[in-house]
Structure formats: C-alpha cells, structure tokens
Amino acid sequence: ISINALQNFLEQMESGYSKHRNPYHNLIHAADVLQTTYQIIYNSGLMVEVNGV
C-alpha cells in the first residue's frame, strides 16, 4: 500500500480512538493488537492464505 494510504488509515484509527476516553483502549492497545494479530497469522502459516487480501 502507499504511504499516503497507510497514513490516512492510521489517522482515521487515531481519530476513532480519540472519541472514547477509555484509558485501556488507546493507540498503544491498537498497535499491540495489530502486531499480535500479525504474529499469529505469520507464525501459523496463514500468511500464504491472506497474502492477497
């Protein structure tokens, strides 16, 4: 994906998290969930299945 698309996605994600004042569900939590999801998909061998998505 392009850098602009990634930046727009991250900005939209940030604005969505900023609406809610929940101390747990914040940008650090979002990054943690994203990284954990990636690791699970990568380590399980499913990356081949979702590579075109």
Image (cartoon, helix red, strand yellow):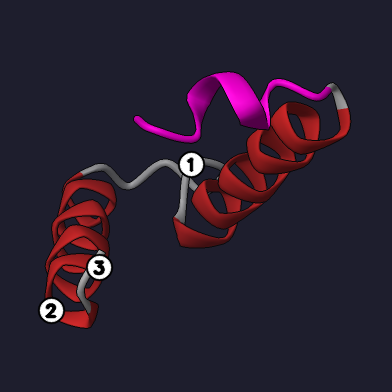
Q: Name the N-terminal-most of marks 1 and 2.
A: 2
Quadrant of residue 5 within the rendered picture: bottom left
Q: Residue furthest bottom?
A: 3
Residue underneath mark 2: 4
The reply, left or right, for residue 23 in relation to residue 2 is right
> How many residues crowd around disc 1 within 10 Å: few (fewer than 14), some, or many (20 or more)?
few
Tell me the SS state at disc 2. helix
> Of 14 and 37, which appears nearest the observer?
37
Say whether residue 21 is magenta: no
Which residue shows up at 76% across the image and 37% down it?
42
Residue underneath mark 1: 25
Question: How many numbered discs, if any?
Answer: 3
> How many residues crowd around disc 3 within 10 Å: few (fewer than 14), some, or many (20 or more)?
few
Q: Which mark is residue 53?
A: none
Q: Bounds of the magenta span?
A: 45-53
Disc 1 and disc 2: Cα gap in Å? Answer: 25 Å
Give amino acid for label 3. Answer: Leu
Tell me the SS state at disc 1. loop
> Of 10 and 29, which appears nearest the observer?
10
Q: Give the quadrant of the N terminus.
A: bottom left
Tell me the SS state at disc 3. helix
Quadrant of residue 8 within the rendered picture: bottom left
Give amino acid for label 1. Answer: His
Residue underneath mark 3: 6
Q: Name the N-terminal-most of marks 3 and 1.
A: 3
Residue 35 rendering spot, x and y as whole percentages = 67, 50
Give amino acid for label 2. Answer: Asn
Which residue shows up at 71% across the image and 28% down it?
41
Please report contact status of discs 2 and 3: CB closer than 8 Å, yes or no: yes
